[in-house]
């Protein structure tokens, strides 16, 4: 009987969790606010996991807060350079002439998502806490609400935005004082992709990659070219 009552009290306590306290615990678990806010660039290397539904090989260079480069291989290979301060997206995609266009909602979302998904909070992104239930936080960032489920170590294990994004984050490791997931799964509709992830904190890069139109021939890490 005492065990049953204790379980009920524990459940009630979880339901009444303080949202701000939960967020602070998650930020601390990721490496702490000072460490998170010190990150200015992040290279993300996504390799197809040895599973039935691997994702395509993908490299990201995130230069916070308003630029990123993406290279995706395999079929429909694509290189894309996004610079919000210049208001442009430059693309090279197989079978499509290289060119530029204005930023769209997908690119603006990705600038926010890169920070939230991998770092949770940065110098330029401090999500507004909306609600908390049990092990789940609801926050607002970039005009969208995200649900963040936390694991037993207070690290994000799932991040969702209704009808748009659904990521599962697993197998956290320490990368220069930051806890980052080395297994990432993305779901959308009937599609599910899984990657093994590696990272480079404060990656060195040539800023000219954001001034020129990408070229797939430059390979998956063109930011290293001078």
Image (cartoon, grey):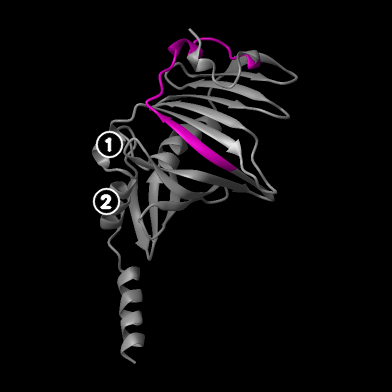
Give how far across and how far down residue 193 sits, in percent.
63, 44
Picture residue at 49% right of the left edge, 43% below the top: 182
Locate residue 104: give its quadrant: top right
Magenta span: 195-216
Q: Is residue 117 magenta?
A: no
Q: Can residue 143 be seen in this view?
A: no
Q: Residue furthest right?
A: 95
Give how far across and how far down residue 197 sits, in percent.
52, 38
> Comparing marks 1 and 2, which lies closer to the viewer?
1
| Figure disc tally | 2
Q: Is residue 53 visible?
A: yes
Q: Is residue 43 left or right of residue 17?
A: right
Dot 1, how many residues are within 10 Å of its Cα: few (below 14), some (14-19), or many (20+)? Answer: some
Q: What residue did someone put label 1 on?
A: 35
Question: Which element type, helix, strand or loop, lies under badge 1?
Answer: helix
Position of residue 212 relative to residue 172, above or below, is: above
Q: What residue did someone put label 2 on?
A: 24
Q: Are marks 1 and 2 in contact (CB under 8 Å)?
A: no
Q: Is residue 203 magenta?
A: yes
Picture residue at 31% right of the left edge, 40% below the top: 126
Distance in Å between CA atoms under marks 1 and 2:
14 Å
> Viewer-proximal residue, 184 or 210?
184
Dot 2, how many residues are within 10 Å of its Cα: few (below 14), some (14-19), or many (20+)? Answer: some
Picture residue at 26% right of the left edge, 41% below the top: 33
> Viewer-proximal residue, 49 or 137?
49
Position of residue 213 relative to residue 156, above or below, is: above
Q: Mark 1 or mark 2, which has the lower sequence index?
A: 2
Locate residue 195: give its quadrant: top right
Give how far across and how far down residue 91 sits, in percent.
61, 19
Picture residue at 27% right of the left edge, 36% below the top: 35
Question: Which element type, helix, strand or loop, lies under badge 2?
Answer: helix
Give how far across and how far down residue 164 sits, in percent.
56, 46
């Amino acid at each position: 009987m005492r065990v049953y009552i204790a379980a009920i009290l524990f459940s009630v306590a979880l339901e009444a969790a303080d949202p701000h306290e939960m967020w602070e615990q998650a930020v601390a678990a990721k490496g702490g606010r000072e460490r998170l806010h010190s990150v200015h660039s992040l290279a993300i290397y996504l390799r197809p996991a040895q599973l039935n539904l691997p994702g395509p090989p993908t490299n990201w260079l995130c230069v916070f807060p308003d630029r990123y480069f993406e290279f995706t291989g395999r079929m429909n290979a694509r290189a894309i350079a996004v610079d919000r301060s210049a208001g442009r997206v430059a693309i090279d995609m197989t079978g499509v002439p290289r060119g530029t266009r204005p930023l769209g909602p997908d690119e603006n979302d990705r600038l926010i998502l890169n920070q939230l998904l991998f770092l949770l909070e940065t110098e330029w992104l401090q999500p507004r806490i909306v609600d908390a239930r049990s092990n789940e936080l609801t926050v607002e960032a970039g005009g969208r609400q995200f649900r963040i489920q936390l694991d037993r170590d207070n690290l994000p294990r799932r991040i969702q935005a209704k009808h748009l994004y659904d990521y599962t984050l697993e197998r956290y490791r320490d990368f220069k004082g930051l806890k980052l997931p080395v297994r990432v799964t993305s779901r959308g509709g009937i599609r599910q992709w899984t990657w093994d992830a590696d990272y480079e904190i404060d990656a060195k890069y040539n800023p000219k990659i954001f001034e020129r139109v990408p070229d797939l021939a430059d390979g998956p890490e063109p930011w290293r070219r001078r």
